[in-house]
Amino acid sequence: MKRLPDDIYRQCVAIAKSYYAMLQRRKEQEEEILHGSAPPDGQPHGSGVGDPTGRKAERLIAARQRNEQKIRAVEQAWARMDDDTAREFIRQNVFEGVPMQYIDLPVSIPTMKRMRSKFVCMVAEELGEI
C-alpha cells in the first residue's frame, strides 16, 4: 500500500478519530435546523439590508455538507475493512481511542498497525485526497 503524505495522513487520522464527535455535531445541526434561532424581539437591529436568516441557513447547510462528507468517508472506509476483526479493531483503536496493547483481539500489534494504516488510506481515498 502506498504511503500517504504526512499532512494527508494526519488529517485523515484526525477525521477518523473525531467520528463520534462528527455524529454528535450532525445531531446538533439537525436540532438547530428544526428549532432555529430565537424569535425576533421587535427591536431594530441595525440598518443593514439583507437576509440574516438566509445567510445563517447557507452557513449551516455548508457546514452540514462538510460534516456529512467526512462521516460518509469514515463509514465507507470502515465498511471496506476486510473482516469483523479489523472493523472491531478500528472501532476500539481509532474511534474510541483504546491503545493497541489493550485491545484483546486475535491479531498482533504489527498487524493492528497495518490495519490502521490501511483504514487511514481508505479514508483518504473516500475523501478524494489520493
Image (cartoon, helix red, strand yellow):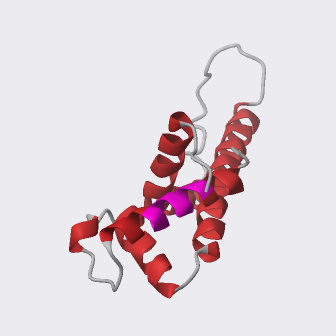
User: Where residue 13 appears, x then y in whole percent?
Assistant: 47, 50
State whether residue 42 is above or below residue 62.
above
State whether residue 8 is above or below residue 107.
above
Left or right of 14 on screen, residue 5? right
Closest to the observer: 31 or 83? 83
Give the residue displayed 49% in from the left and 78% down from the top.
Answer: 87
Q: Quadrant of the N terminus?
A: bottom right
Left or right of 60 on screen, residue 117? left
Secondary structure predominantly adopted by residues drawn in magenta:
helix
User: Where residue 78 appears, x then y in whole percent?
Assistant: 57, 71
Q: Is residue 62 visible?
A: yes
Point out the stretch of residues depicted in magenta. 114-121
Give the residue displayed 39% in from the left and 69% down from the top.
Answer: 112
Residue 104 figure quarter:
bottom left
Quick one: which residue is furthest to the left in this view?
A: 102
Left or right of 47 on screen, residue 37? left
Residue 126 figure quarter:
bottom right
Closest to the observer: 62 or 117? 117
Give the residue displayed 34% in from the left and 86% down from the top.
Answer: 106
Tell whether position 93 is magenta: no
User: Where residue 12 appears, x then y in whole percent?
Assistant: 54, 48
